[in-house]
Structures are given as structure tokens and as C-alpha cells.
Amino acid sequence: MKNIIKIRMLLGVTLCAFTLLTESQAAVSDANGKYIGSVKAEWLPDGHKIKLLENFIYEDSKGLLWKAPSGAIVDGDSIPPIAWKVVGTPFYGKYRDASVIHDVACDDKKRSWELVHLAFYHAMRASGVSKLKAKIMYAAVYHFGPRWSQRKVVSPKILSQLLTQRIDDDSMKMSLEEEVVLQYLRKKDIEKDIELFVKIPAPKKTLTSDKFDDLVVLIKKYQDLGSPLSLKQIQAYK
């Protein structure tokens, strides 16, 4: 009888612990978004790429949808090799679903590279990747992953100011196209509600592999101290 009572008590404690763990994982997922569907794919003959057989979607915490459509070709190349020695190769481990979303978003370039890499971090967390590993992966893609120029809408007045600053900055020469646009803006009385697009080039990558190793050490150190580095601190590291 006593043994039965002990077994029941042990079972109750185990179920309680499982419930707390499940609730904790659900909280992490809710805070970092969720996946819609699962990755269903086939390996292509080259042995490196995979082809998605169904739509796969990540919805971030703000409701923004990141779609990996059926037929998309994914190869994991958006994850820089410098990260492989720390967390493993693409399609390995809990972060593989996030890497599929990241790969497609990097190929599409419909959103800014900063936003794409940030979504990768939160998608990893939604997959159950630890904060430590997710931050190391984020550091790798932010400093060594793909970057691309962006198109931003600005008013004619702001554009004129930006181009004038380019003239004042001796280190930044204006292109012929920019000179023509600036002359046009100065001559014409353009309405403020007209939309003009400016191409913002991606900043150059400046972090070396040695510096990345130092950053990984810092991320681990402050995580152990209970004062983890923020994503902004990781971005600003030089």
C-alpha cells in the first residue's frame, strides 16, 4: 500500500514537472511567434539542396508572416560557415526550421536584411533553441550573413538634404544619376506628398573571424553571469 502511495506521489510530481515544462515552452513560442505547418521536403540530386513540397510559414510575435512556399529551393547557404563550428551545419538541430525561413527570406530580399536576421533569431527561439545558441547564431548571420541594399520612401525635401550631404562629404562622391536628381529637385517645386524611392546600400561587413570568436566568448560569459548581451549590443560589436 505504501509503495502504491509512493508511486502515485512520484507520478504526480512527474506530471507536474512535465506540465510546467510544456507551459514554459509554450510561453517561449508565444513570445517569439509560431510556425504554421511543418517542413516537408525532398533532397535534390546534388545532395546539398532541398525542395519544399508544401508551404511552410513562420508568424512572428507581431503577426508578420514569413512564407517559404512549396517549390522553394533551400540550401542553408544563408547560415555563414563561421557559425558551423559552434552550432553545426545547416539542417542540423532545432534551428533547421528557422534556417529554411531565413534562406527563403534572404533569397527574396523583400524585407531589410536586418529584419530578416532578427526574424531568424525569434524563429529559432520559437523552435526551442536556447537563448545562448540563438544569440550566437544571430551574431553570425548579422555580421557575416547576406546583406542587400534597400529602397526607402522619402519626401523630396529629405532626399534633397541627403544628396546635399553627399556633396559636403568629401569621402562620398555622387553618381551622375544622383547629380541629375539633385538638380531636378532644386529647379522644380515638387509637392511633398510625392513618393520618391532612395536606394540605401548595405553597410560593409567589418568583423573578422577572430573578433567573432571573441564575441562568442563574451556572449557565453555574460550569459553565465546572468547579464546576457542584448541583440543591440551584439549588433554594435566591433
Image: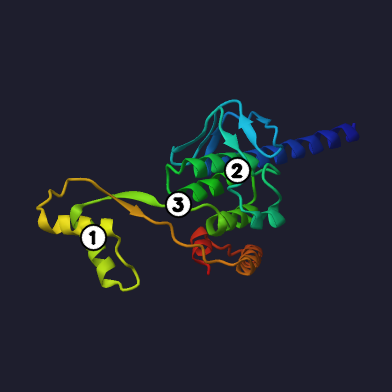
Q: For the residues marked 1 and 3, what is the alpha-carbon distance in whole angstroms?
A: 23 Å
Q: Is residue 103 above or below residue 175?
A: above
Q: Amino acid at mark 3?
A: Trp
Q: Position of residue 216 (x, y in %)?
A: 64, 64
Mark nearest the camera among 3 and 2 is 3
Which numbered disc flags the more N-terminal residue, 1 or 3? 3
Foreground pick, 143 / 199: 199
The circle on residue 148 is: 3
Secondary structure of the residue carrying numbered label 2? helix
Q: For the residues marked 3 and 2, what is the alpha-carbon distance in whole angstroms?
A: 18 Å
Q: Position of residue 115 (x, y in %)?
A: 45, 49
| Residue pointed to by mark 2 | 99
| Residue pointed to by mark 1 | 179
The quadrant of the picture occupied by the N terminus is top right
Q: Amino acid at mark 1?
A: Glu
Mark 3, Cα crowd under 10 Å, few <14 / some 14-19 / many 20+, is some
Q: Is residue 36 left or right of residue 169?
A: right
Q: Position of residue 72 (x, y in %)?
A: 56, 32
Q: For the residues marked 2 and 1, what is the alpha-carbon distance in whole angstroms?
A: 41 Å
Mark 1, Cα crowd under 10 Å, few <14 / some 14-19 / many 20+, is some
Q: Residue furthest top?
A: 54
Q: Residue at x 27, y 59 (%)?
A: 176
Q: Amino acid at mark 2?
A: Ser
Secondary structure of the residue carrying numbered label 3? loop
